[in-house]
Image: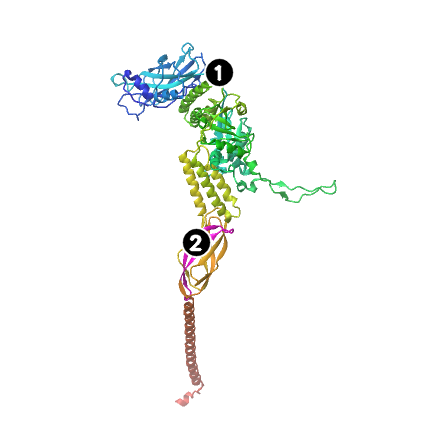
Amino acid sequence: MTAITPDTGLRARLRRLAGRTAVLAIALGGCALVVPSAATAAEQSDDEPSVELHVSAGLRGVIAPGSSTSAILTVDNGEDATLSAGQVEVELSRTPLTDGEAVSSWLDDGEAPGDFASVGTEATEAVDAGASATATVFLSEATLEGLGPGVYPLRAELTDATTGGTGDDAVPIEASATSVLVVAAAQTSQVGVIVPITATPEAGALLTAEELTTLTGPEGTLTAQLDGVAGTTAVLAIDPSIPAAIRVLGSAAPESAREWLVRLDGLPNARFALQFGDADAAAQAQAGLPSLLQPTTLAPFLDVANFPQTPATVAPTADPGATADPTPGATESPALPTDEELMAIEGALPRILWPQDALTQKDLTAFAGYLEGDTTTIVSSTAVGGGSAAHATAGGQDLLVTDAAASAVLSKVAAEPDPVDRQRLLAEAAARLQLTKGATPGAPLLIGLERDEDRTSDALRDAISSADSIGFELSALRAVAPVAATVTDAPDAARAGAVGALLADETTLTAFSSILADPQVLLSPERIRILRTLAVGTSAAVFTEKVAAHQERTRATLAAVNIPPSSTIQLLTANADLPIAVRNDLPWPVTVQLFVSPTDPRLDVKPMTETVVQANSTTRVKVPVSARVGSGEVDLRLSLYSPTGVQIQGDQSIRVAVRAEWETIGLVIFGGLAVLLIALGVIRTIRRKRREAAEESAVEAQIDALDETAAQPTEPEERRE
């Protein structure tokens, strides 16, 4: 959006400024490329609301020679006040744009050859604030007479409109939009579109059930990709990790994922398999690998419980008339699918590779060796010097060549969720396709969409439908006589070097995995993550980040089993078991051997103890020790090894404070205390006994005295008188 003064003499400046914005309107099902501008008073800020004009003509910007069409103009009022009625004028230059550079110059800078002539005007109605209105300018056959096949600059201009009221308060508004009108004869060239079907899991191995539920749901991106290709002749390039992720789940696979796979198999589109994880074959060839990387095995992802068991076979009886009774509960083990069955793509064409464009002739030769036969490699036209027929050969190796310019703009179409901007890109694509087909009339053309996992179904369908031909067959293209081409020999040293680094890390993990009962639970996901790290379609910066993230993950895995740092251990007896902690942060149990050696002969230790540490836990390994001295400090060297002798953790020291004499001192003290307590108890008992004896004697004396008194005779009373 560009602000200008209301002076109508500045229209040329307005048009130049208009070309630096990019918005397209959709109108009545078809449009041409639009680069609109908006204008208000000079003092208006570019950040404030404005008026925008959009123009569209033809079906996706295309009309047949000698036909009529309509230009649909849409006025969007982003102002805070009502936009008054005005007038729109459509102008056309009869000087065609001759190449892609001319198209870019017109669309990006508003510069086009030839003179523009008015082809129609129409009044526009008042537009409320925040609303839009359309006007139609009919372009008759007579108006467009004489336009041969080609790409013609088209523009529109809004005048005589105001905002802000009437009289002196009115602010004049002008806006313009640029576009192209493509005049195309009946299509004689066969055009095919290759669409990659990919999906990357968050954890980097296989898609989980939760991810599949989302991706294959009604709003999922995998569903959108099938919706976009349905009903077209697009060639599908499918990552086999997607069907593998669904099949490994067996009966636990989400219903939507199983239905998605059935729907994929039922599509009539030609297809071929990408390498697992869409890994780049060119990087592997340049790294000198003897064969393409593949998953080591998918068995760790299988759960027997998710695959139905079949009843056991009942052996026939000797008597033909007798009925054999099967053993109650007898079943056969389920037949688990093989890796080939898990990764299979129904109807896939064999021996086709689609690597990065940075490849050499030597890579093409390596591809033939990898796939053991005639191999077809899909490359961009930039990889063969910027141009070639759709079917070519280089050094005796078969090539399918995609048009780089058309592929780039259609990839933008497929990635654009906004329908207005998407229609603008569609018209540009129509212009570039017309120029490409015009350069080699009747020759087949191949489009390769870029890898993109976030396309909407509408955007993908628009991109394919704007280019593909009814009845296009990849097999027919491959049957066309190839044209000789030369590969530009531009290897990617960074990617090739990364392959070696990633495989070196994998070798280290292979040795480390000997602590596991089944090493493949670690190595299988690791290989898949390597393949995904090498995926085609990532920029150099993103690729570097992915390699760094993978290496960091490897370091974290190698450090997951360790001996945590420990403070000084107090040994208060001559013979004891020292508790040594071993931590396992892996999600699987590990078997390790703990080696312990003292730095001083004053301490004897058991040199090796094997233990199993459960997943995500810490186990204290008891190591028997014996002290030969009364006291002192001794360092112990600790290290972890796998049962096969692979070092898991290097030497680590802990200090042991030996206080063995404390045991004797403690015994003497406790013994003395025991004797003292016993003596005190004896003394207390003796004193209590003596006291009790004295008390008993006193009581007996009193009793005796009373008895003597009672025994004396009593004198008669009268005698006493």
CA–CA distance between discs 1 and 2?
A: 78 Å
Q: Nearer the viewer, residue 371 or 30?
A: 371
In the rendered image, residue 3, in percent from the top left (x then y), is placed at 29, 22
Choose top left, top right, bottom left or bottom right for residue 104: top left
| Residue 641 belongs to magenta span | yes
Disc 2 is placed on an element classified as: strand
> Of the residues under marks 1 and 2, which one precedes in the sequence?
1
Which secondary structure class fits the magenta region best? strand
From the viewer's perspective, is the residue at label 1 or at label 2 nearer?
Answer: 2
Q: Which mark is residue 651?
A: 2
Q: Residues within 10 Å of mark 1 (few under 14, many from 20)?
A: few
Span shown in magenta: 633-661
In the rendered image, residue 546, in percent from the top left (x then y), is placed at 42, 38
Choose top left, top right, bottom left or bottom right for residue 382: top left
Q: Residue furthest front?
A: 395
Amino acid tagged 1: Ala
Q: Is residue 75 left or right of residue 283?
A: left
Disc 1 is placed on an element classified as: loop
Q: Quadrant of the N terminus?
A: top left
Q: Is residue 607 left or right of residue 108?
A: right
Q: Residue furthest left?
A: 168
Amino acid tagged 2: Asp
Instruction: Residue at 36%, 12% (x, y): give it.
Output: 118
Q: Is residue 651 above or below residue 557?
A: below
| Residue 252 belongs to magenta span | no
Q: Is residue 677 above or below residue 245?
A: below
Residue matched to label 1: 186
Q: Residues within 10 Å of mark 2 (few under 14, many from 20)?
A: some
